Amino acid sequence: MKRHFWYIILLLMPFAATVAQSPSFTRTKLKNLENKTVKLSHFIEDKPIILVAYGSDCPICQKYVPILRGMSDTFSTITFIFVFSKWDSLQAIKDFVNEVGDKGALSHSVTKNIYFLWDKKNKLLKKLKATTTPEAFLFDRNKKQLYRGAIDNWFFALGKYRPQATEFYLKNALTQFLNNEKITVPQTHPIGCIIEY
């Protein structure tokens, strides 16, 4: 009997390890731009991802659109997901996608490596413990968090920003990760609009 017990345990070990490596946030259900319910896991599969907590009416989020769009072009193998909170509406998100940037610069990226999802009940944002829009999260293919915080140091307080950024936190973390290097700055304090739960 003991032999059979340990045999079953050994058979189940690989499955248990797989489950342990799959964080619960990947199973969160969200809404896409067509108002259909989708699981986050559908968009990320086994790829590294960047999730960015976003707000359609947040002025700082609006200013970061070209920067994030440029990063998505540079790092085309990485999936970028903009996550909007319950304080947005689906129409506001659609308007944001179509209007912000260079005449809807984001809209034609939906089929590439940028996706826009609505966290209608803030379930995902709560799991991530997101505090601010914009706030970026970098995860490896096993969904281990490698970086969280500000995109760069362009803004240093609400309404206060430098002529241009001098520290590129998210880009540096992503570059170091892709080069199999240690991420030297794994967390920073994001500046932006506070997420209310």
Image (tube, rainbow, N blue to C red):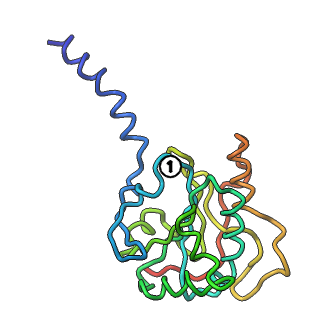
Would residue 75 appear left or right of 5 to someone viewing this image? right
- Asked if residue 16 is positioned above or below residue 124 in the image, the reply reads above
- Asked if residue 53 is positioned above or below residue 48 in the image, the reply reads below
What amino acid does circle 1 point to?
Answer: Lys
Q: Residues within 10 Å of mark 1 (few under 14, many from 20)?
A: many
Would residue 76 appear left or right of 81 to someone viewing this image? right
Task: Residue under label 1, please give it.
Answer: 143
> Residue at 59% of width from left, 86% of height from top?
58
| Quadrant of the rendered image containing residue 75 | bottom right
Task: Residue 158: give x, y in percent of width and height.
Answer: 69, 85
Q: Give the structural element (helix, strand or loop) at label 1.
A: loop
> Residue at 48% of width from left, 76% of height from top?
84
Q: Foreground residue, 89 or 87?
A: 89
Task: Residue 176: give x, y in percent of width and height.
Answer: 73, 48
| Quadrant of the rendered image containing residue 91 | bottom left
Quarter of the image with the C terminus is: bottom left
Q: Foreground residue, 155 or 107?
A: 107
> Residue at 27% of width from left, 23% of height from top?
9
> Residue at 41% of width from left, 55% of height from top?
41
Quarter of the image with the N terminus is: top left
Q: How many marks?
A: 1
Q: Residue furthest left?
A: 1
| Quadrant of the rendered image containing residue 134 | bottom right
Q: Foreground residue, 122 or 90?
A: 90
Would residue 98 appear left or right of 85 to someone viewing this image? right
